[in-house]
Image (cartoon, rainbow, N blue to C red):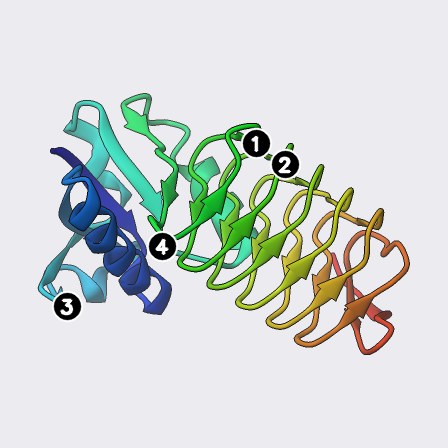
Amino acid sequence: MSDIVIYGSGGFAREIAHLIEDINKVDNKWNVLGFLDDNMDNHGKEINDLRVLGGKEWLSDKENINVVLGIGAPKAKKVIIRNLEQYSNIIYPNLIHPSVTISRFNHIGLGNVICEGSILTTNIKFLNFVTINLNCTIGHDVEIGSYSTVLPNASISGNVVFEECVDFGTNSTIIQGIRVGEATIVGAGAVVVKDLPPKCTAVGMPAKPIKFHD
């Protein structure tokens, strides 16, 4: 078994711990050492039988330690990874739930998490630290940029492109061939039928930008 720590200790981090338990039922691969949290008030706490070991400094003297992000917010993921660049001893594995349907012709980068019940067809490309939540469907030739998060029950049609740090909401749908710009937030239940610009929040059916942000 390989040692792994979960970065974060909130709700999604607990879901990651459960995902790893399910992986281990099929392939006894991971030994979860605990959580890491930069909030010092949480250090030493026990959460779902796992201890909060400390913050990022805990990693400084470890050799070849596996780390998975237990945080879903795209911007937060990007900040954490930048803060961890000082450590050359970290390995970022991909965690894929055993129930996921996924083609062997897909390209998956580093540190991606694909949760229970999702279906990924063929020739899909993920960059790094992408989160695919529960029961999502992703069609052929989709490209998803680093740090992006797809929330539960979302449906992504073929040839869609998500640029970096896209946050795609629960139960949202996007038709084929659409591009979503960097750091754009798509609200829950939205239906995206036209390209969306970077750094906006888009909601509705059809989805339209309602505000822009940095």
Q: Amino acid at mark 2?
A: Ile
The answer to whether residue 79 is visible is no
Rounded to the nearest angstrom, the CA distance separating label 4 from label 3 is 14 Å
Q: Which residue is mark 2?
A: 124
Q: In this image, 177 relative to 165: left or right? A: right
Is the residue under label 3 in contact with that under label 4 (CB below 8 Å)? Answer: no
- The quadrant holding residue 48 is bottom left
Q: Amino acid at mark 4?
A: Gly
Which residue is drawn at the image coordinates 16% and 28% (left, top)?
62
Neighbours of disc 3 within 10 Å: few (<14), some (14-19), many (20+): few
Mark closest to the chain's N terminus, 4 or 1: 4
Q: Nearer the viewer, mark 4 or mark 2?
A: 2
Q: Provide residue 96's location: percent of width, then percent of height.
A: 38, 45
Mark closest to the chain's N terminus, 4 or 2: 4
Q: In this image, 53 relative to 8: left or right? A: left
Q: Which residue is mark 4?
A: 70
Rounded to the nearest angstrom, the CA distance separating label 4 from label 2 is 23 Å
The answer to whether residue 66 is visible is yes
Mark closest to the chain's N terminus, 1 or 2: 1
Q: Nearer the viewer, mark 2 or mark 3?
A: 2
Is the residue under label 2 in contact with that under label 1 (CB below 8 Å)? Answer: yes
Q: Which residue is mark 1?
A: 106
Q: Amino acid at mark 3?
A: Asn
Neighbours of disc 1 within 10 Å: few (<14), some (14-19), many (20+): some
Q: Amino acid at mark 1?
A: Asn
Mark closest to the chain's N terminus, 4 or 3: 3
Which residue is drawn at the image coordinates 60% and 56% (left, top)?
137
Q: Which mark is residue 48?
A: 3
